[in-house]
Amino acid sequence: MQLNFAMTTVPTIALWLVGLLIFGIGALLGYFNMNIEARKKLESMETNTEILRTDAERKLADAERKLQEVQALKSQLPGAVVDPGLLRIKSDRGVEMDGVSLNLDSFSAEKKKRLIEVISYLRPFLDAPVQAAQPVKPVQATPKPAVVTPPISSAPTPPTPSIASSLLGVASATQPLKKDPEQEFKLLSIVQQIDTVLQKRLVGTPLEDEGIRLVDSPSGAVEVYIGLQRFESIDDVPNETIKNVIRAAIAEWEQKYVPGL
C-alpha cells in the first residue's frame, strides 16, 4: 500500500501528531507511576525492617534485664541449692528424688525402680570396711601390798557362784554360735540379696542349669551373667523369659525386704 501524500490533508497530519503525543504522555505517566509504586514498596519494606529490628532489640533488652534480675535473686540466696541431687531427705521428713518430692499416694512402679537404682549408689559406702578403733594403751597399775591369807584346808570346797558362772561363761564361749540366716542375708549387698531370691526361684525350673546370676558391677549397678555371657543391664538380656524371671525376683525382694514400698 502506498501513501499518497498528495491526498493527505492537514487535519489528518494533525490527528497523527495528536495521537503520537497522547501515546507519549501515556507512556511517561505509566513510567512515573511504576517508579512511584516501586518507591512506595521499598519505603514500606524499609519501614517494616526498622520495626522488626526495633522489636528484636527491645526483646533482647528485656531478656538481658530478666537474666540480671534472676542472677541478682540467686546472689541474695546464700543457702540456695543449685544442684538438687539424686536423693534428698529434708528436715521435715520429706523426700525428694531427682529434684521432685515423693508422695506415697502417687508412688508409681517407675519411681520405685528409680529409687532402687539411686539407693544402689550407696552400696559401696555400706560395703566399705570400717576402720578399727585405735588400741588404748594399758595403764600400769601400782603394785598392791601383799595380803596374808590364812592357810587353806585340804578338803575341797565348791566353787563360789561367781566363779561357777564365769566358768559356764567360758564354756559357752568356746561353743560355736549358731548363725542367723536372716541376719546374714541383711549383711549382703542389694544385688546379692536379689540374686539369692533369684536362685531360690530358679530351683526346679528349666532355667536352673542356665547359670543365671546377678553380680555387682564396679560402678555399683547390676550385671547379669548367663553362663559365660555378661550383660551390663537386665534390659540387655535378649531372652524375654529370663528377663521376666529376674524382674519377678526383684518384685519379690521389694515386697519382702523394702519396708514402706
Image (cartoon, rainbow, N blue to C red):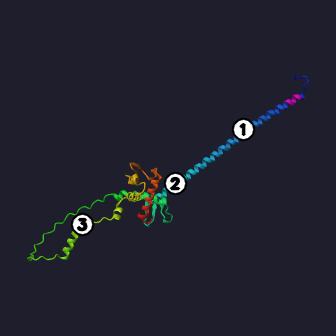
Residue named by callout 2: 67
* Marks 2 and 3, how far apart at CA: 73 Å
Residue 48 is left or right of residue 145, and the answer is right
Which kind of residue does numbered mark 1 sit on?
Answer: Asn
Query: Which mark, residue 35?
Result: 1
**Who's the residue at 53% across and 52% down the image?**
64
Residue 137 is left or right of residue 257, and the answer is left
**Who's the residue at 75% across and 39% down the image?**
33
* Marks 3 and 1, how far apart at CA: 115 Å
Q: Nearer the viewer, mark 3 or mark 1?
A: 3
Dominant secondary-structure state across the stretch colored magenta: helix
Residue named by callout 3: 175
Q: What quarter of the picture does the C terminus occupy?
A: bottom left
Instruction: Determine contact: label 2, label 1, CB under 8 Å.
Output: no
Which kind of residue does numbered mark 2 sit on?
Answer: Leu
Q: Nearer the viewer, residue 33 or 119?
A: 119
Packing grade of label 1 (10 A; few <14, some 14-19, many >=20) is few
* Residue 127, position as x, y percentages in the image: 34, 58
* Residue 98, position as x, y percentages in the image: 46, 58
Q: Nearer the viewer, residue 47 or 209?
A: 209
Quarter where residue 95 is shown = bottom left
Mark positioned earlier in the residue sequence (3 or 1): 1
Mark positioned earlier in the residue sequence (2 or 3): 2
Q: Which residues, given as a range, are shown in magenta?
A: 12-16
